[in-house]
Amino acid sequence: MKSKTDIYHRWVAWSDEDQTYIGRCPDLFAGGVHGNDPLKVARELQQVIDEWEQIFETGQRSLPPVRVKPTVEFA
């Protein structure tokens, strides 16, 4: 099932500075989620994105526009 938030860029990457994986979705919220397992971080990031979608829907607000776009598209 396609979600309204599927259009937002998200990523999980290793941070040398923090010595952990960090997951972000900058168009929806500042900050991110972190942990030692990139798959767990990706799942937690999706949970937070889903929560933000519910917050916007409950408040009857439109989701913000997409600002961050990948430089290369993959099919």
Image (spheres, grey):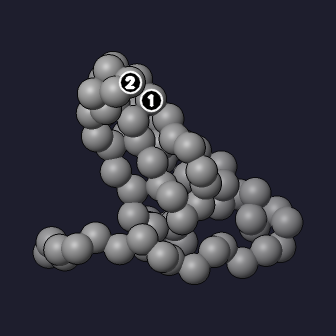
- Reply above or below: 70 against 47: below
Residue lying at the far right in this picture: please name it. Answer: 59
In which quadrant of the rendered image does the N terminus lie? bottom left
Assess disc 2: are there few (<14), some (14-19) or many (≥20) residues with their C-alpha within 10 Å of its C-alpha: few
Task: Examine the image and state in which quarter residue 28 appears.
Answer: bottom right
Residue 63, percent from left and from top = 65, 73
Depth order, front residue of 32/41: 32
Which one is earlier in the sequence, the residue at label 1 or at label 2? 2
Q: Quadrant of residue 29?
A: bottom right
CB atoms at circles 1 and 2 under 8 Å apart? Answer: yes
* Total residue callouts: 2
Residue 18 - label: 2
Q: Amino acid at mark 1?
A: His
Label 1: state its secondary structure. Answer: strand
Q: Residue at x 75, y 67 (%)?
A: 57
In this rendering, which labeled residue sits more in front, label 1 or label 2? 2
> Which residue is located at x 54 percent, y 65 percent?
27
Crowd band around label 1 with a 10 angstrom C-alpha radius: few (<14), some (14–19), many (20+): many
- In the rendered image, is residue 43 in sight? no
Residue at figure coordinates x 57%, y 80% from the top left: 65
22 displayed left or right of 75: right
Label 1 to label 2, Cα distance in Å?
A: 9 Å
The amino acid sitting under disc 2 is Asp
User: Where residue 64 sits: x, y (%)?
Assistant: 63, 74
Q: Position of residue 39 (x, y in %)?
A: 30, 33
Does any portion of residue 11 appear in the rendered image?
yes
Query: Which residue is found at the position 54% from the left and 72% from the top?
Result: 4
**Could you tell me which quadrant the C terminus lies in?**
bottom left
Residue of label 1 = 34
Secondary structure found at label 2: loop
Of 11 and 75, the residue lying toward us: 11
| Residue 55: % across, % down | 75, 57
